[in-house]
Structure formats: C-alpha cells, structure tokens
Image (cartoon, coloured by chain):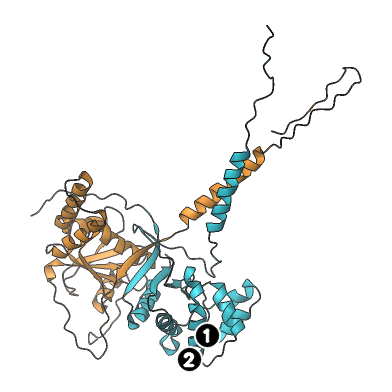
Chain colours: A orange, B cyan
Amino acid sequence: MAEIIQEEKGKGGKKKPKKGDAHVDMTPMVDLMSLLITFFMLTAAFSKPKVMEIVLPEKIKKDEIVEPPKIAESRTLNIILGPQDKVYWYPGKADPAVTVLQETDFSATGIRQILLDRNRALFRKIDDFEQKVIRGEIDIKQDSVANAIKQLKKDDDTGPIVLIKAYKTSKYKNFVDIIDEMSIVGIARYTFTDISWIEENLVNSALGIAPVVQTPAQ
Amino acid sequence: MPKIKLATKSPRIDMTPMVDLFTLLLTFFILTATFRPQEAAPVDTPFSVSEKPMMDANVMTVIISKDNRVFFNVDNGPDTILKFRPKILTEMGKRYNIEFTPDELRKFEKSGTSFGVSIQDMKAFLAAKNSDERIALEKGVPIDSADNQLALWILFARQVNPSVQTMIKGDADSDFPIIRKVLDILQDKNVNRFNLITNLRGAGEIIVTEETTE
C-alpha cells in the first residue's frame, strides 16, 4: 500500500513543496511480524511430544527360583503380534494339537472388539464412573479420578488377563498400538512375555512357513 | 457563520502501538523457542492415545532408528547446567581407558545431541568438523553382549544422576526384537519403568455391543 504521489500537472509552473508527511508505512512490517509470531507460536505449542508410560514386571535373576504366578486359564487371552500389522489371538493355554490361532487386525472392529467383549463389565464400570464425574453426580477432585479408576481396575476379577507376545518380524509400532488398545479398552491386567516355540510355530503355519523343529526342553 | 470545514485527509490508523506489541510478542516467542539440535537419524515415533506430556529435565533417551541403530542421549534439557554429561563421559572413558581432554568434555557437554558411536570412536566423533563426518561414524551404540556399551551408559547415567527417567524413542518401523533387546538391557540395570515417546492421535470409535451371552 505504498503511496504514489503524483504530481499535479498543468497548474502553471509553481511547484508547491509537499508538506512533510513523516509517516512510514508500517503495514508490510506488521504483516511480516504477524507471520513470524504465528510461526513461533505454533512451533512452541506443537513441539512437545507425548509419552506413554509402561511398567514391566521385574526380571527374574538367573539363579533365583521363583514360582510363576498362577492365573486362571479361562481368563487368559493370548495376543501375538505378527508381521504386516497382523494380530493373532487365542484363549487359554497353548496346545499344539488343539489351539487354533485367530487372525485379526488393529481396527476398531478387530482386536478392540475382541478385548471389549471380554472386558465389558469393567469397561462399563469405568465408563459409568467417568460419566457420573462429568455429570457431577460424584463429587471427586479431578486429580483423584485416575486413582479411582486404578482402584476399579484393581478390584476387577472378571476381565481377561492378557498376555502379549511378539513374533520376530513384528514392528515396534504394533507394540505401542497394542498397549494403546489396552488403555482404550481399560484392561486391568496385561503383561508382556516372550513368545514360546509352540506359538512361534503356530504363527509360522498361519503364515505358511514350515514350522521350525525345536526341542521343548527349553 | 463560517462553515466548518472537514479535513479531507484519508483515514489512517496509527500502527505504532500495534508494531510495539508485535515486537514484544515476537521477542518473547523467539526467546522461549528452544531449537532442537538436529538428530543424527530421523525417527518417526508411533502414534498413541497417551496425553502425558514429555518431561524436560532428568531424562535419558534411548533412540532406535528405522535401520535398527541405537542412539543414546542424556541431559539434553535445562539440567545441562548441572554438568552431568561430562561426568558420565569421564566415567565411561575410565572404564575403557580412554582419557578425554577438558576440551573434548566441553564439546560433549555443549552438543546436547544424541550420539550413536562406540566409545572407541567418541574422540573422532567429537573432533569431527562437519555433520557428514559425524554421520559416517554413527554406526549405533554397541548393544551386543560381548561389548554392551549401552548398558554401561545407562549404568553411569543412573550413577551420576539417580533421578534420571528413561525414555525410549523408537521409530514406528523399527523391528521389535531390537526394542525387546533394549528393554532387556534396561531391565538388567533394574529399570522397569519406561516412557515411550509417541505422537498424539484420537482413539477412534469404540463399539460396545450389547451382552449376548451371559
């Protein structure tokens, strides 16, 4: 918006010196500054990544003999992370003769549905609780909501116990995704264990790879 | 009665206060902006629904790149002033009988970036003049059981700064076994609480079907 001052012509030689208009046009400067401010504001707000906290059970030392915790077979759900974002699952205990792997994926109708079906009671309880807090029916401080939900999870005794295992060609992304699903569905008990050779062979056969012969001695 | 003559000047807004304000804001944002130094390997973190923001201070980060190299970084936040970095490097040097000059220690402290070099290459890494030379040296911190330098870095980082928290920044496409190995190394050093660095995304739909059996 720079001003172009045209000289008036044809008014008979007398030139009037323009009265000093000491204004500097600041519009471009303002333009540039708002642009820079927007840039710095946006980068400041979005540069912070999020973290997802996980706690793994303490490792058992080699010379220590610890009785493995006993869990009900009927409540156990095994999830195996496969290659190409595939997820395999089976309930109960692995038995090479009987166990059939079911294949699913990370969509809302995939593994989430399977987990939800088994965790419905607890999921309802948590959902009800959150709704009541939002509606103001339960008077609770905002910071103790998370603790109350934790307590609900702790008291739960019907939901599944999920054992997560990873096949050797699975990606890190799958690992984060499955932990995510656990928190979305509100699974109270899940842990991460090493894949057994039986399960590995089950995945191999599901993928059409010849099973690796291994002695069950380990 | 004399007529009141209206000024025929074009209306002009005085922008000076606006410019003043903008300058102030701009200065503020420029000063608060923290420029992250360029990382050696670009890492695309996976997405999750976690909303917990990342901590600034007292962190050590294990970075796993797409090509399965392992990088390590410690004290890259405001706590750099506590000078943990040179202490950790000195300890590490002592273990491998490598003496670092004060100049090298200062360089290491100032860089604040992650590194993916073995301790034997550290001197060359610190002396490198440009990023091309540095990248050529970054083959990843050794994690095999014969020479597990990552475990030692973790050990010394925790010795020097006991309140350090562990971050794992893995590329979404890095292979899981390498992550498992890093987790194993951390657990060997009695670190059981990890923070996985992720990006935020929505949870998507949750379909609650009615009870059918029960």
Label 2 resides on the chain identified as B
Left or right: A206 with respect to B149? Answer: left
Label 1 resides on the chain identified as B
Vertical order, A109 against B77 (above or below): above
Q: Which residue is drawn at 15% across and 62% down?
A: A159
Distance of label 2 from label 1 (alpha carbons):
10 Å
Residue A87 image position (x, y, % from top left): 29, 63
The verdict on a common chain for dots 2 and 1 is: yes
Left or right: B114 with respect to B173? Answer: right
Marking on residue B95? 2
Foreground of the two, B37 or A198: B37
- Residue A185 occupies quadrant: bottom left
Marking on residue A167? none
Q: Which residue is drawn at 12% across and 64% down?
A: A157
Kindly identify which residue carries mark 1.
Answer: B119
Mark 2 vs 1: CB contact within 8 A: yes
Left or right: B126 with respect to A63? Answer: right
Left or right: B18 with respect to A172? Answer: right
Tag 2: amino acid: Arg
Q: Which residue is drawn at 51% across and 86% down?
A: B90
Q: Can residue B89 be seen in this view?
A: yes
Q: Residue at x 86, y 20 (%)?
A: A9
Residue A132 image position (x, y, % from top left): 18, 47
- Mark 1 lies on a secondary structure that is helix
